[in-house]
Image: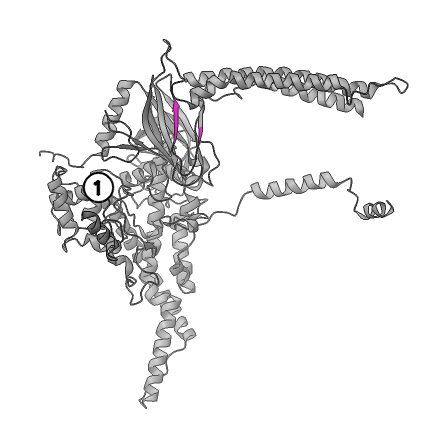
Amino acid sequence: MGRFWAIFFGLAAVITFVVSWISPGMNWWFPGDQLAHSTLGGKIDDLFYLTMVIVAVTFVATNVALVYALWRGATIRSDERVWFSHGSHSLEVIWTIVPASVLLFIALYQLDVWAAYRIKGFVKDSDGKPKQIVAVAEVTARQFEWRIRYPARGKTLQPKPQPDDVYTVNELHIPTGDLVSITLRTDDVQHAFFIPELRVKQDAVPGKLIPVWFDALETREYEMLCAELCGWGHYKMKAKCVAHSVEDFEAWKDKASAEQFDDGYRQPVAE
Amino acid sequence: MMFRATFLSTLPRPSRMGFPSVLLCGLALFHLGCGPGPQAEFKFRDSTVDLIGDANREVKKTLKDNFGTPQTLVAWERFPVEYGGVKGAVTSIGEDKSLVVTVDGDPKMIQQKDPLIWISGSLVGEKNATSATVKSFDPESKKLVLEGAAVAAVGDRFAVDFGKDLQDGRKIYMKNCMHCHGVSGDGAGPTGEFLNPRPRDYRNGTFKFTSTRTGEKPNRDDLDRIVRYGIPGTYMPSFLLLGDHETAVVVEYVRWLSIRGEFEKRLVAELASDYSKTAINDAASKAEAAYKEKVKNGEAAEKAPSQSTARQNATNEFKKYFTEDYPAAIEETANLLAEYWNRGQEAESVVVPSVHRVNDTPESRERGRLLYLSDKTKCYTCHGVTGRGDGSATEDFWPKPNSSEKFSKRGLHDEWGNQLKPRNLTLGQYRGGRRPVDLFRRVYAGIKGTPMPAFGGTALKDDEIWDLVNYVMSLPYTEKQPSPAASSHGNVAKREEKSAH
């Protein structure tokens, strides 16, 4: 029976490793083309892959050790002398210090990325200057949709609604290039704003206005959804984020504004 | 030590079958939870159920024959619903019975084994009865070979895959809408009762936020807007990402459900006064009372028939009615509904302002404010002097429509009997849309099924409505004034006086 468990855990580890290895090729990995489509997202991916490598090495090493121990235990002769490792001081020291230093390394290494996501001025241009953050919209999550308010063209986003604000629902329009920020809030319960391909995710918490910034590298549509089980209609909260070029963004806003302030008057057709 | 040992031995020992039986239980529960639920069915109105035996049965049969069940829908061509499919006509007939046809839509939509029905000529069948299937069709030469069909004549019109969109619409509806609006569109889905405001019951054929004139049905664009953008301030969410085809077919399905519901309502209304249990019992007890009254006064009187006799009489009468008048009642009801829904779709039914929006100046807003507070519009009685929806009408007990009874709760009620708050205009939340034209239409044509009256054409001229719209649209952005209710206590006024001195 002992050999069975050695083979069982050995196979489980091998299968896990193989499935993880082929995942990207089978499209079981990140959504879309599996790449981050924002500069901040690229940093997140770098961190993720670094952690992934560390974890993979650890996983393989611990499983080799586990299978070896199981196999040795199952095949040991009754007259053979065993090595009793419990209470070994040097072993305890090694497996405390090694993981601790790895964790400490990750904790220090990720500080820049955390700061870029959370503290203004930490995303730099190519010439080292802090990148500007443009407030584009206020995004209000509610059961079960996203309602979005933009400032009128040429104006800045105000905390309170303005008469010339532009509104959309389930469609977040942003310009590419600059870092754009949204003010995230919720009308009812907790939701989470999530654009997987841009690697941005933030909980919307009742009573809080949370700034979230990100950028999009390409002018196209990105999937946007709720990542917090918010009620029975959670699955209905699918939306899209539309990234325009700066000119197109202004043109879109003009068009949306014209539609929103349509007075319905139509010149009667001359007969 | 002894004590502990005996104590332990009394504990039940874990059975060797413990884990497998727990697993089995879990699987059984999983299967129960994920298995098919009860079969969906169209519910009938209470008023239909209230009809006496024969009438009850016949009305249900009529509905089933003409609208089907959620599993097998019946597309009644009479009504202006885009049931889907490709229509065409026969142009010539080959010797091998193959047909050359013209097709109205995309010829590539016609596929092998698609069902085909005839909609004109001698082969016209019953509603959606399948009379043939497509054996082969060549989109280039438009040569159509049918399987097992009688020979058609040149000029006969047919439809392939008729009702496809209605079926698609049902799928979308059952997935996204049924949860609140219910299988029959009665607003009584599983989540419906927990929502405030309640989900719309389509079966009256009344929709609140439309672009059409007072009393007209909504048009397709109205329903499309609601599905796409939702209704802010209610639980109706936006279904913007549903897709164009999906939105179009679900709108058709809602129109169809609404027609089905109103058809039932009108047909039953036709019968209810003579053939409903309530009406018969009422009449019988009234006759009984009158008889007793007469006997008491010593007058000669005929004994009133008992309730069971009255019901028997009604059943006999219904037999006569059923053969003589019932088919005509169905025809009339169907014609009326077809006419209403067709008219709602016409361009003339849409409220279009005759003038541009009046410039949003302080003067215009002031004119609007005076109109708002005038007795011509009486806006303030419901929406309140400051626009917060706290007018005096919300404090009154209102009579139920067509009844001397009053609602048990204070305030206004809608056609569906739900308590209804007048909109708070200072929030900047507009259920029927925030475009100026949306607000114009609300004032012009009123809100259907609610106490919001129509002002357009009669009470207010178009530019006056625009003044009113300008004033209402400015309310969310003006300094909040203390409501008269608060100042009536005198506190606010006094404090202001003090600070002034």
Q: Is residue A27 visible?
A: yes
Residue lying at the far front of the rendered structure: B501
Magenta segment, which residues? Answer: A202-215
Q: Please, what secondary structure does the residue beneath circle 1 have?
A: loop
Q: Residue furthest right?
A: A79
- For the C terminus of chain A, the quadrant is top left
Tell me which corner region of the image, top left, top right, bottom left or bottom right, holds residue A160.
top left
In this rendering, the count of numbered labels is: 1
What residue is at 18 percent from the left and 54 percent from the top?
Answer: B378
Q: Is residue B154 magenta?
A: no
Q: Is residue A259 above or below residue A134?
A: below
Residue B366: percent from left, percent from top? 13, 45
Vertical arrangement, residue B195 with respect to residue A252, above or below: below
In the image, residue B301 lies at what x, y percent? 33, 86
Q: Is residue B131 visible?
A: no
Location of mark 1 (residue): B478
Neighbour class for label 1 at 10 Å: few (<14), some, many (≥20)?
Answer: few
- Classify residue B440 by image quadrant: top left
Front one among B142 and B177: B177
